[in-house]
């Protein structure tokens, strides 16, 4: 950004402006979202996270662990992003900086060295560790509060494996999410039942007659007869390494991981039936992938997960452009206000606010 200002660009002054800006980030994000909506005409909200490599450990929320961005263990920050996406365009319009457990003094995994840096990084005392899937839900709710109504959410297995995140149908949203093949689920024809009350202890609650099975087991049980060749994305003239050799679809009751209150209520609150698609890569037969979808019944089950799952790959282009062309990978704001999009102010922005700039 400083380079674009030419010879008169004062890099140090720009760093100070970003670090100590008093702008309400919620309003900035809202105006960006309103400006991009008519351009993109979004059909889905895509959730993903990315890493920002750091040479030192002075920036807010930096932790040392493995990151796919660098392919090694190093210092980095993690940010969760919400993208407006359609088949032809996408853009990140909402962000949250992820605060690791080691930065939260209220947790057992707190690192005294990192906790001592909270004041220098201007991290508010009330800010603590929040799981990435919860940050994603907060951003979805915030974006919808600005008048942006997109009926579908797309995310990868880092979010899809969490049952609490998949309660999106309670918000009136469909979803297409990746899940691991070890995630548990019930077959479509499984029906909860209640044991007879014997008159002693508590009355029995509704429960599934059998234990949930792994997704891989459900796919194997579906058999080869339900498999057929599909292609998840085009290779633009290259070798067809991204073409799946087969895919199975089968309805399921999603279970999976999540907080205890979600896991215990999965047979009553979280009983959304959706198609489950699983396949293997033609170039890597030993590697399987699975996608779970909750979409309107008017869409044929075999066609539901594939197109939205492909759309998620669009956002990799967003990250590449932001990091390489717009300087996101070189961001030098070390404080919490500079490196995060703060929570909405008490007076949240409304769509009637001007957005002509």
Image: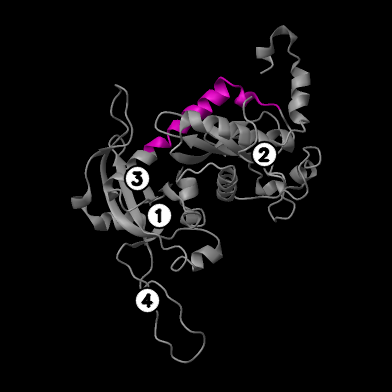
Quadrant of the image occupied by residue 50: top right
- Tag of residue 305: 3
Given residues 87 and 334, the one toward you in this image is: 87
Q: Which residues are magenta?
A: 310-332
Disc 3 or 1, which lies upstream in sequence? 1
Given residues 130 and 38, the one toward you in this image is: 38
Mark 3 vs mark 1, foreground winner is 3
- Tag of residue 182: 1
Q: Is residue 318 visible?
A: yes
Q: Which residue is mark 2?
A: 26
Local packing at callout 3 (Cα closer than 10 Å; few below 14, some 14-19, many 20+) is many
User: Residue 121: x percent and y percent?
Assistant: 77, 37
Tell me the SS state at disc 2. helix
User: Residue 163: x percent and y percent?
Assistant: 48, 57
Given residues 178 and 102, the one toward you in this image is: 178
- Residue extending furthest bottom? 199
Mark 4 vs mark 1, foreground winner is 4
- Tag of residue 143: none
């Amino acid at each position: 950004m400083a380079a674009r200002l030419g010879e008169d660009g004062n890099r140090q002054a720009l760093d100070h402006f970003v670090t100590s800006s008093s702008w309400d980030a919620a309003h900035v994000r809202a105006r960006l979202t309103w400006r991009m909506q008519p351009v993109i005409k979004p059909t889905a909200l895509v959730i993903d996270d990315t890493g920002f490599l750091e040479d030192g450990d002075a920036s807010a929320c930096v932790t040392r662990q493995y990151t796919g961005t660098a392919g090694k263990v190093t210092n980095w920050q993690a940010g969760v992003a919400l993208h407006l996406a359609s088949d032809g365009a996408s853009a990140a319009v909402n962000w949250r900086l992820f605060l690791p457990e080691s930065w939260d003094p209220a947790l057992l995994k707190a690192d005294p060295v990192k906790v001592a840096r909270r004041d220098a990084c201007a991290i508010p005392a009330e800010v603590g560790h929040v799981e990435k899937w919860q940050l994603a839900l907060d951003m979805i709710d915030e974006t919808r509060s600005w008048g942006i109504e997109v009926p579908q959410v797309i995310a990868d297995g880092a979010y899809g494996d969490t049952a609490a995140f998949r309660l999106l149908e309670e918000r009136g949203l469909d979803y297409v999410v990746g899940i691991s093949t070890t995630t548990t689920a019930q077959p479509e024809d499984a029906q909860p039942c209640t044991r007879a009350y014997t008159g002693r202890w508590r009355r029995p609650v509704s429960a599934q007659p059998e234990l949930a099975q792994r997704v891989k087991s459900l796919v194997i049980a579906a058999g080869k007869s339900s498999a057929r060749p599909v292609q998840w994305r085009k290779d633009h003239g290259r070798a067809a390494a991204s073409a799946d050799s087969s895919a199975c679809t089968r309805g399921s009751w999603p279970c999976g991981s999540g907080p205890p209150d979600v896991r215990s209520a999965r047979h009553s609150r979280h009983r959304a039936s959706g198609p489950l698609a699983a396949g293997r890569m033609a170039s890597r037969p030993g590697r399987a992938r699975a996608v779970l979808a909750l979409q309107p019944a008017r869409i044929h089950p075999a066609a539901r997960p594939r197109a939205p799952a492909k759309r998620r790959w669009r956002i990799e282009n967003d990250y590449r452009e932001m990091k390489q062309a717009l300087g996101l990978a070189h961001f030098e704001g070390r404080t919490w206000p500079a490196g995060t999009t703060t929570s909405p102010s008490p007076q949240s922005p409304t769509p009637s606010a001007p957005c002509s700039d």
